[in-house]
Amino acid sequence: MKTTVTELPESRVRVEAEVPPEEVERQLAKTARQLGREMRIPGFRKGKVPPPVVIKRIGREAVLDETVRDAIGRWYADAIGEAKIAPVGDPNLDLGDLPAAGEPLTFTVEIGVRPTAELGEYKGVEVGRREPQASDEAVQAEIEQLRERAARLETVERAAAKGDFVVMDFTGSIDGEEFDGGAGRDQMIELGSGRLIPGFEEQLEGVTAGEERTITVTFPDDYGADHLSGKEAQFAIVVSEVKERQLPELDDDFAIDQAGFDSLDELREDIRAKLLQADERQVEQAYREAVLDAVVQGAKVDVPETLVDARARELWERMLHSLSHQGISREAYLQIAGGGREESELLEEAKPDAERALRREAVIAAIIEAEGIETADGDVLDALQESAAREGVAPEKLRQRLEQSGRLDDLREDLAARRAIDLLVEHATPISVEQAEARGKLWTPEKDSEQPAGDQQLWTPGD
């Protein structure tokens, strides 16, 4: 595919693409074969109508129009790849006239692209890095979670309190009429869990086994059942048991029973080691991001607002696409996580993350170019080793699968980006968090423009 790239203002480009005539004809024949499978033409068996006959019967323009609809997405991706650009946001695609036989198909794409970065000093940056830790409080919290999971419920002969479990029968009614789903038998609920209608659990505090009680609650306006939303209901309760959660004693027997250790001290040390290992990973990830952000801060990157808007929309749509695979619709997400806010408000909130991502990507791309970082086939196969082992296939076969699906280049770019960040981290100098915070408060000439007139300090190179 032949492409011509023209740079436009605000990090946009125009890509003029030309699909070769032979590719157009190949896709045209493919479409005709697909259409022919459903056609009945005298002299030919169903599904065996040759493409030329289909084209003649339907008309070249109609078949070509269907061909373009099917193939334009792939041709667009090929054009972007051939033009070697990193697109941001949705494209504006202008399709030229349908070509005659033997002529190429042309189309034009205008789209935002990743901004370019003018690098500052990117080797030797000093960045705060804290020491990994596993505090006594964190270890104890893990042990308490183990105790909670090992707790038993024991029947008690006393009034129920918050944290207890109540076993009961109940019947709900509205205006004296029982409603569907409002009755239950031998139901056990935890007081204070907040899982039931507001006010339900609170009115059960103080009940005892054998007691009958009527409580009144109001269903929330946004309750899942429309026939109950906002309605006041009465529940006739009959309590059969009150149960108390009893935690196991925290001793060596607990360590043996719950984790197979000989003593409680051994259990504590094992938990501490695992917490420390997990925190080391978090510290390393935070340090890598801090190094990258320090390099980004020293670079010059022009990020137009239109590009930020486009990336924010990309991040939003990508998240919704992921949620759709979990059965969560756009409307459901807005209701649950959005707190009733409009989509436009959530997009506005995503802008800082979108701009940060664009700046990082621009700097990483500049470092890859400056350092001549390339991803060899061996690097790709090494990166696929773990995934290939999980799937029980050879790394080479997995590489071929990625290539066929058009995802191999994405993997190469990810590996190159990882190597670029590795390089930054390798040459960076870690300092204490206290030093980093202190330096952040120091005044330097470049901060002069950020201070209001009258608040400026005197500064000399020796300060």
Image: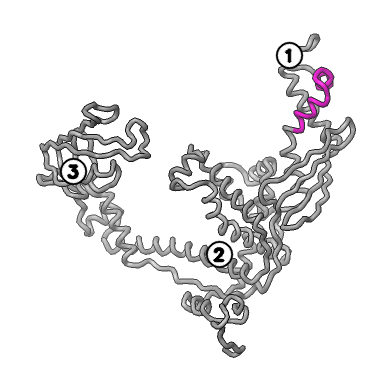
Asked which secondary structure carries label 2, the reply is helix
Find residue 459 and report its horizontal and vertical position in percent: 59, 87
Q: Amino acid at mark 2?
A: Glu
Q: Which residues are magenta?
A: 50-68
Give the residue furthest to the top: 42
**Classed neighbour count for the residue bearing mark 2: other residues with Cα under 10 Å, few (<14), some (14–19), many (≥20):** some
Q: Name the image quarter holding residue 304.
A: bottom right
Q: Quadrant of the N terminus?
A: top right
Residue 306 in magenta? no
Q: For the residues marked 3 and 1, what is the alpha-carbon distance in whole angstroms? A: 72 Å
Q: Amino acid at mark 3?
A: Leu
Which label lies toward us, 3 or 2? 3
Q: Amino acid at mark 1?
A: Lys
Q: Which residue is mark 2?
A: 289
Residue at the spot x=18%, y=33% of the render? Answer: 236
Q: Earlier in the sequence, mark 2 or mark 1?
A: 1
Q: Earlier in the sequence, mark 3 or mark 2?
A: 3
Residue at the spot x=82%, y=35% of the render? Answer: 23
Q: For the residues marked 2 and 1, what is the alpha-carbon distance in whole angstroms? A: 61 Å
Q: Is residue 236 found left or right of 317 in the rendered image?
A: left
**Classed neighbour count for the residue bearing mark 3: other residues with Cα under 10 Å, few (<14), some (14–19), many (≥20):** many
Q: Is residue 142 found left or right of 176 in the rendered image?
A: right
Asked which secondary structure carries label 1, the reply is loop
**Classed neighbour count for the residue bearing mark 1: other residues with Cα under 10 Å, few (<14), some (14–19), many (≥20):** few
Q: Please determine whether, in this image, residue 437 is positioned above or below residue 170.
A: below
Q: What label sits on residue 156 in the rendered view?
A: none
Q: Is residue 352 found left or right of 31 in the rendered image?
A: left
Q: Is residue 385 found left or right of 337 in the rendered image?
A: right
Which label lies toward us, 3 or 1? 3
Q: Which residue is mark 1?
A: 46
Find residue 107 and report its horizontal and vertical position in percent: 80, 41
